[in-house]
Amino acid sequence: MTAGGELVNVPLHRHDITIDLSRIEFEARYGVTDRWQAALRIPYERKDQSVAINAIDPATPEEIAAMRRNGDIHHRDESYTGFSDFSLLAQTAFSDLVREHDGLRVGFGTTIPVGRTEEDPWKLGEAGEEHLHIQFGTGTFDPIAEMNYATPVGAGFTANGFVSTRLPVYENDKTYRGSREITAMAGLARAAGPVGLRANYLFFRQGASAWDGERDKNSGLVSHSVMFGASYRVGPTALGVDVRIPVSQRLLADEEDAFEQGVGVMVRVGI
């Protein structure tokens, strides 16, 4: 696209996009009965997007400028902040189910659609209008469920497993239906006084989302990671740090844009 808005042919080039995600999540629990409690999770996110235009074939400065103008329609060097969808769950726990001193916690509930959503970016892009693929929610109440099991295995170690899912079932008022997601984790943890250490394997599957019934080309991912963490308890307060290292990933459709996850760092404070 020229400075005057006319379409021009440009050499083959690539858009390299980096998104750094920072997330703070507050969780509050309230005991409703001796067996049941309500849990509310409130996440706040910052998403920093940076874009680089790299010419694959030789290009003049004018052609590179045209590439940048076209790219600015789709993605820009910008930062976005806001609340993501809240989660509200009913939780209960059981003990000594399979073996002595084991524990199972289950929860189910719904997301609360407070996160900002966008208009269909594919339709806006086809019309040559500026748009945004980054969203902070689905705009729908999505059923969620989770299960966490832990059992001692000797020598001070505890084996644990965790599964959670989010299942959007309908479109929002902008014709978007979110991805169905499942997360599974298994690992070992060991506590020595106030210090705790843990190592986990993490599986994540994000299904395809859709706009107006059509598959979102930038959705659908299966990834495998490992996580290592440590915590320290001071009285009723626990401080923890976890590092997630990607091992492998694949996209669910060959025509999707290439996407690569980076290393993630998580800081926890429990009171």
Image (cartoon, helix red, strand yellow):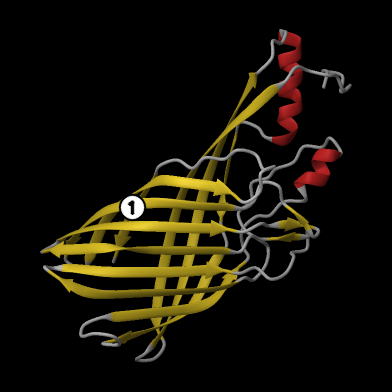
Q: Amino acid at mark 1?
A: Met
Quarter of the figure with residue 269: bottom left
Which of these two is toward me, 41 or 105? Answer: 105
Q: Position of residue 160 (x, y in %)?
A: 30, 69
- Locate the C terminus and report the quarter of the image it occupies: bottom left
Mark 1 surroundings: few (<14), some (14-19) or many (≥20) residues within 10 A: many
Which of these two is toward me, 224 or 72? Answer: 224
The residue depicted at 71 percent of the width and 28 percent of the height is: 71
- Circle 1 is placed at which residue position? 227
Residue furthest to the right in view is 6
The residue depicted at 66 percent of the width and 57 percent of the height is: 208
Q: Is residue 184 above or below residue 80?
A: below
Q: Position of residue 145 (x, y in %)?
A: 51, 75
The residue depicted at 41 percent of the width and 45 percent of the height is: 246
Residue furthest to the bottom in view is 34
Q: Position of residue 222 (x, y in %)?
A: 53, 53
- Locate the N terminus and report the quarter of the image it occupies: top right
Q: Position of residue 223 (x, y in %)?
A: 49, 51
